[in-house]
Image (spheres, rainbow, N blue to C red):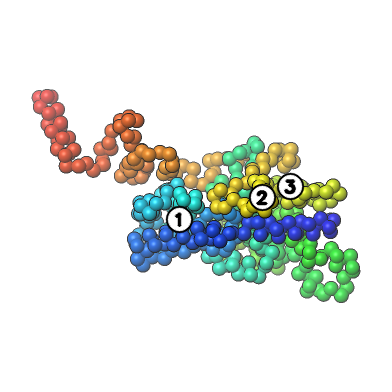
Amino acid sequence: MDTVNLKRLSDEIKEFEKYLAPTPYENKCREDLFELIKDVVQWKYPHSNVEAFGSYETQLLLPSSDIDLNITAAMNVSARDILSKMRYSLTKKGLRIDLFVPQATVPVLKVSDPRTSLTADITAQNNVASSTRTLAWANEYPELKPLFLVLKHALLAIRFDWDPNYEVLSTVKNGLASYSLVCMIIHYLKYKDDDKDNDKNGDKGDSIKNQKKNHPMTRLGRLLMGFLSYFSSFDFEKNGIGFYSKQGVILKLDHLALKQAKEVHQVMLIENPDDTTSNVARATRTMKQLQAVLAWMHAKLHIAIESNYFRRSLLENIIKVDPHQPGKPRQSLAKYHFPLIRLTKDDVGTCLPSVDPNLFANKNKPVYRPKPWDKRKRVEYENDEDEYHYRPSKKRGYQTFNENKSRSPKQKRMKQNNAKKSVQLKK
């Protein structure tokens, strides 16, 4: 590849990392929201523990990234009860409830701060993956953060014209998780990085041409192109990604996490570095879609690097941002938006089927999702299904109360009197 353009690509990756770096205002807003939720939780459950995980803890975050929290309380309290109490307590503190999924496999409460539009995903009694491993990797591999931010930003913006509901980087829609992307980058840096092999073998026998090719100034560009090329042709149907074998590739049929699975070839396998018997990418079933996107990104960058035509930017082929005047800062927190990149079947080059929406996680789970403009009162039905409904105000219509719902003493007396009158009329 053209060494000059590879150096340009490496410089753009570094500049893009600085562009996405959190500002002091963003750090202060995230810290305030975390402390507010932590104070409310410890007020309700004094001996509980509130742990942050994900991008907030590892600092591998975009400007619009939310906060992931997990509440660990006494063992005799269910996650559903904890989040139900938190919903009302956080509302009194001025936060807004955006989403509540009580009957999911992992109940989730999504809240937001109306002042900053910053969101937080709260779970309870959940064995979340510790961020210690990711933090150790970030210290060992400095290339992890810039490569992750570029790949995550690019994958979040990509959509398919024939399947607009599918998202590449969303486990809810059978896509890839952020931690799985981290594992893929570390796997490539550990097993496929040519610079480390050259350092082990020594540079005495290297020619001047190879030294220019492996120049440190072009390292990030070469790593990005190598990552896209390697995983776009990886055989995910038969093999998985490991961290403790010599080549880093393991057979799916030999892994304990997939021996009892019915559809082994449809599940992506990334061995958990902290527990070799579990699969990090167990929710990912769209490997073909992921590989098609990675191949498209590699082709776009390869054409731009090999072209003699001067381009304003090389990364703009796979990453789009909202234009703003030079010298002015980007938008912060939820105001940071980026245009979507919609791929057609001609762009991808293969005929990919649409992802079955029935496979999406939590599709048939009851969800409480209030609208910000909806000022109606919410009525909670105390039945086994625990569904959530609205009772409109008098101006919008009339809705009968549930028979099982508790009534005031006056309403009970009126009901008893009406029942007596109806019995007398029948007689």
Q: Which of 352 and 137 is in front in this view?
A: 137
Q: Do the residues labelled 1 and 3 touch (CB within 8 Å)?
A: no
Counting other residues with Cα less than 10 Å from the Cα at mark 2, is it few (<14), some (14-19), or many (20 or more)?
many
Residue type of the residue flagged with mark 3? Asn
In this picture, is 136 found above or below 416? Answer: below
Residue 123 shows in the view: yes
Q: Are marks 2 and 1 in contact (CB under 8 Å)?
A: no
Please report the residue visible at 27 percent of the width from the left and 36 percent of the height from the top. 401
Counting other residues with Cα less than 10 Å from the Cα at mark 3, is it few (<14), some (14-19), or many (20 or more)?
some
Image-quadrant location for residue 395: top left
**Residue 69 at x, y percent in the picture:** 47, 59
Of pointers 2 and 3, the one earlier in the residue sequence:
2
The secondary element bearing badge 2 is classed as helix
**Residue 394 at x, y percent in the picture:** 30, 32
- What's the distance in space between the residues labelled 2 and 1, CA to CA? 26 Å
Q: Mark 3 points at which residue?
A: 317
Q: Mark 2 points at which residue?
A: 154
Of pointers 1 and 3, the one earlier in the residue sequence:
1
Image-quadrant location for residue 380: top left
Please report the residue visible at 79 percent of the width from the left and 62 percent of the height from the top. 218
Please report the residue visible at 83 percent of the width from the left and 58 percent of the height from the top. 4
In this picture, is 408 found above or below 181? Answer: above
The secondary element bearing badge 3 is classed as helix
Q: Nearer the viewer, residue 284 or 338?
A: 338
The secondary element bearing badge 1 is classed as strand
**Residue 195 at x, y percent in the picture:** 78, 67
Q: Which of 192 and 253 is in front in this view?
A: 192
Residue 101 shows in the view: no
- What's the distance in space between the residues labelled 2 and 3, CA to CA? 10 Å
Please report the residue visible at 14 percent of the width from the left and 38 percent of the height from the top. 413
Q: Mark 1 points at which residue?
A: 122
Residue type of the residue flagged with mark 1? Ile
